[in-house]
Image (cartoon, rainbow, N blue to C red):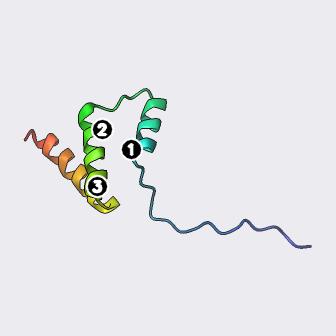
Amino acid sequence: MKTKRAAPRPQTKGLTLGLEGFAWISAVEGIKLSLESLEMFVEFDRLGLSDEERRTFIFREAQSHCRGA
């Protein structure tokens, strides 16, 4: 008797959300994006930043806020 095997899952490194997806998830969780956050995502799109460039920018911004700079 043959057993059924699940289809293999695609190998992915993660998921990167755009402004629409991030805004939708935030709204579902009851979080409203600040004007600063909205402007940041619009600027990312305008500059055509890659996912990695966006993550790096957000990470550096978070670091500067933690340091109080």
Question: Which of pointers 3 and 2 lies earlier in the amino acid sequence?
Answer: 2
Amino acid under label 3?
A: Arg
Quick check: 60 left or right of 29?
left
Q: Is mark 1 on a helix, strand or loop?
A: helix
Quick check: 66 left or right of 4?
left
**CB of mark 3 within 8 Å of CB of mark 2?**
no
Q: Is mark 2 on a helix, strand or loop?
A: helix
| Outermost top residue | 30
Q: Nearer the viewer, residue 28 or 47?
A: 47
Q: Could you tell me which residue is drawn at 28 percent across and 55 percent down? A: 54
Q: How crowded is mark 3: few (under 14 residues within 10 Å), some or many (20 or more)?
A: some
For the residues marked 1 and 2, what is the alpha-carbon distance in whole angstroms? 8 Å
In the drawing, what numbered circle is on residue 54? 3
Amino acid under label 2?
A: Leu
**CB of mark 1 within 8 Å of CB of mark 2?**
yes
Between disc 3 and disc 2, the foreground one is: 2
Q: What element carries label 3?
A: helix
Quick check: 54 left or right of 27?
left
Question: Which of pointers 3 and 1 lies earlier in the amino acid sequence?
Answer: 1
Residue hosting label 1? 19
Amino acid under label 1?
A: Leu
Tell me residue 31's x, y (percent).
39, 29
**CB of mark 3 within 8 Å of CB of mark 1?**
no
Residue hosting label 2? 38
Q: Could you tell me which residue is drawn at 45 percent across and 64 percent down? A: 13
Q: Residues within 10 Å of mark 2 (few under 14, many from 20)?
A: few
Question: Which of pointers 1 and 2 lies earlier in the amino acid sequence?
Answer: 1
